[in-house]
Amino acid sequence: MRYKLLVIVLLFCSLRGMSDAIHEIIEVKWDLIDTETGKANPVSRLTIINPTDKPISCNDWSIWFNYMRRIDPLSVDKRFSITHKNGDLYRLGFEEANLFIPAKGKLEINYVTKGLVPNFTDVPSGLYVLNEKTNETNNIRNYDINTDVFTPAQQKIKLAAQYDINNKNLGGEKQLIIPTPQTLQLKTGKGFVLSGSTSLIFQPQFEKEAGRIKEFFKSTLGIDLSPVKNNGSVVSFVLDKNLGAESYKIEIQSNKLEIKASGTAGAFYAIQSIKSLISANQWKKSSSVVLPELSINDSPRFGYRGVSIDVARNFHDKSAIFRIIDAMAMYKLNKLHMHLIDDEGWRLEIKSIPELTEVGSRRSAGYSTGLSLQPSYGSGAIASKNQYYTEEDFIEILRYAKENHIEVVTEIETPGHSRAAIKSMQARYQKYLALGNIAEAERYLLNDPLDLSIYSSAQYWSDNVMNVGMPSTYRFISTVIDEVKLMYKKAGLEMKQIHLGGDEVPRGSWEKSPKIKSLMDSLKMTSVYEVWPYYISRISDLCKEKGLTLAGWEEMGMKNDGKGMKVNPALANRGIRLDVWNNIVGGGQEDLAYKLANAGYPVVYTSASNLYFDLAWRNVFDEPGHTWAGFIDLYKAYSFLPTNFFLNITEDSKGKKVTSALFEKKERLTAKGKQNIIGIKSGAWSEKILTTDRQEYMLYPRMLALAERAWAKETIWEKNNTFDKSAFDKDYKNFVAKVGEDELGKLNVINGGYHYRLPAIGIKEAAGKLLLNVEYPGFDIFYTDNGEEPGLRSEKVGQSVAYDAKKTYKFRVITAEGRMGEVVTL
């Protein structure tokens, strides 16, 4: 008996001793059990592996992770539990007493996801171990995601489908410039020879832009323009006061390249057209470049041509923003919307309220102290440092954007999506309360401590809505706006607008708040739904007092009478600019942008169906991105018709075929409404965009399609009542040819190269051969048939290779610069 007790004690001690280093010892793997595309409620599996020769006790520790989908807790084996905490944070616990992982053994935990798990970026992330007794946390070091989920037969079907998609879009005649000018007339002639003997002349107001083109020609083409006028060819900048602020003319003849503009913006955009006109092959050091003779008369279709970047969910530093600005400038995009604030992070220093970044920019497993936010989107146990822009950083961004004729639109999200601000102000409250300074503690408090309202936001938060019945909420918003406005002033700019969010306040908010009840009683409100338009009116007045235009998401122009959100015409005369994203086909709001524009609201059409670049390119497991609004490849982005959205829709967001009957009762734009569509904008929410490389993968080349739709004039196939698909497809092929053969090559040169999405390979078996193509031209495929990974020394593929079913083939796209795409195995 004494011997048995000794063995039990030794075993117990060995198990307890291991628990301190669990995060270093265990290996965790994730697999998708159901790989059928589009299958509802699929089964996934987490496997916890013990690679050691001693059993590991499961007492006293748990695994925590982030997961963007909802897990059915009843689907989990009763030995375990998976509990939703808040947002996307889950706890995996061990419920069976004295459960252990056997030596060289494993535990498998299957669970059902509500909805779909369509690709690898939906998987559990940021796994860490919590010691339940000591509260010590550490990130799990060995975590593997199985992305090889397709059988060989499924892989063949997927690659053949990609081949057919690629094949439809190849073979175009390269368009000359992206975005397409309003008018471009090619002329016959020998062309304009640009060389070192070409002189540069300009009027004084164009000195800066003349310097830009001189620097581009010298650094990129190796051609140094002469400052002395001679009898040879000449590049000139000429003032034309009859042109609009962003308009320009270009005249290229055998002996001159003349740019006309009324100011620097037009001259700047003319330079971008010259850059686009010069092919990627000519973007190299040479003694001369020949340009075609032509005339261009150009103006933008929309005054607001925007890119929205979310740096709140996952932070992207100043250098990443500079790279985006450079690319935007090259394609004549002029509004950078920075989503700086959300539930998961506050990313802008506000010096008078330092807690916003001291608490709101940090995420850690120690969040229960109130000194950080909880882990989100794979951030893990340990808080990262300096995940925000200092005031100096932001001023640099403002100035750099201005130099490139881009306005930064600052978004301070309110009243929903505000958990980072709320938690930061709770920490501030506790700090000043401990000092006995109640007035200072309550100065910027954003939540009512007695509020018992129950709700769940779109991202499953239960505590992310500011209380708009408290004066301290408006005091907070006012102070933040004042400090942001001062940053613009320090940058030498006038801040003209502020974006205050306004989207996705969940049902149930404020319903059981004493502060809201007091507000309603004072204003004789009969329903909590009346609080929403009251809030919008109040912040609209606040912005007006500060000389600012209020901008926000579509809900700012809407109200709820208890039967869902609908247009609120009562606020249309306030000039509130709305970003309207909800046009999801099959969702019922396909005409929302048009309803709001017709009602009198200025609308920036931010189409989730076409321009949300955080959405996955295609419905395959190895493609990153969200899927809730469908899939957006280059074709889908290009196909967006801002003023005639329904004309070319053939599928809903789930990929099911639809007919025009779906839109028969939908509201069309009136003449007034069409004037109120003031621009278009892309979105890139960053839940799944953790790095600069992933950000650029998601943005490019789709941003080029955005530029085309934002700048180029309304097309003939957009104006008509019937969609001319053959004319559209011809234009798209020409666009793709320009993108693949020229523009992506230029993105290899700028800023050391961008990490754009390389084209997908298509493969189809036919007559003893594998037929191959790529999504857009200008890229080479390399392959092996001996099991090795393809590299630049491997054999280059033409249009096909001989196929031997006994061999394993590996293919990948490799650029001339050596950048390698994903390996495709067949």
Image: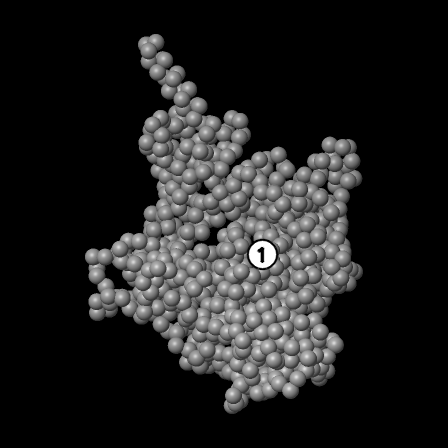
Res 192 seen here:
yes
Q: Nearer the viewer, residue 410 or 524?
A: 410
Q: How many marks?
A: 1
Q: Residue 729: percent from the left, percent from the top?
A: 43, 77
Q: State the residue at coordinates (58%, 40%).
A: 383
Q: Is residue 790 left or right of residue 81?
A: left
Q: Which residue is mark 1?
A: 320
User: What scheme was used to colour the molecule?
Assistant: one colour
Q: Residue 661: percent from the left, percent from the top?
A: 44, 74
Q: Residue 511: percent from the left, percent from the top?
A: 63, 47
Residue type, label 1: Ala
For mark 1, give the secondary structure: helix
Question: Which quarter of the rendering shows the N terminus?
Answer: top left
Res 566 seen here:
no
Q: Is residue 266 left or right of residue 44?
A: right
Q: Tell me: residue 336, above or below residue 739.
A: above
To which quarter of the image does residue 226 belong? bottom right
Q: State the residue at coordinates (51%, 61%).
A: 754
Question: Which quarter of the rendering shows the C terminus?
Answer: bottom left
Q: Tell me: residue 553, above or below residue 300.
A: above
Q: Residue 129: percent from the left, percent from the top?
A: 48, 34
Packing grade of label 1 (10 A; few <14, some 14-19, many >=20) is some
Q: State the residue at coordinates (51%, 79%).
A: 176
Q: Nearer the viewer, residue 291 or 449?
A: 291
Q: State the residue at coordinates (42%, 63%).
A: 815
Q: Is residue 590 left or right of residue 305?
A: left
Going by the picture, which residue comes out furthest to the bottom?
A: 188
Q: Tell me: residue 497, above or below residue 316.
A: below
Q: Tell me: residue 504, above or below residue 737.
A: above
Q: Is residue 235 left or right of residue 488?
A: left
Q: Nearer the viewer, residue 495 or 324?
A: 324
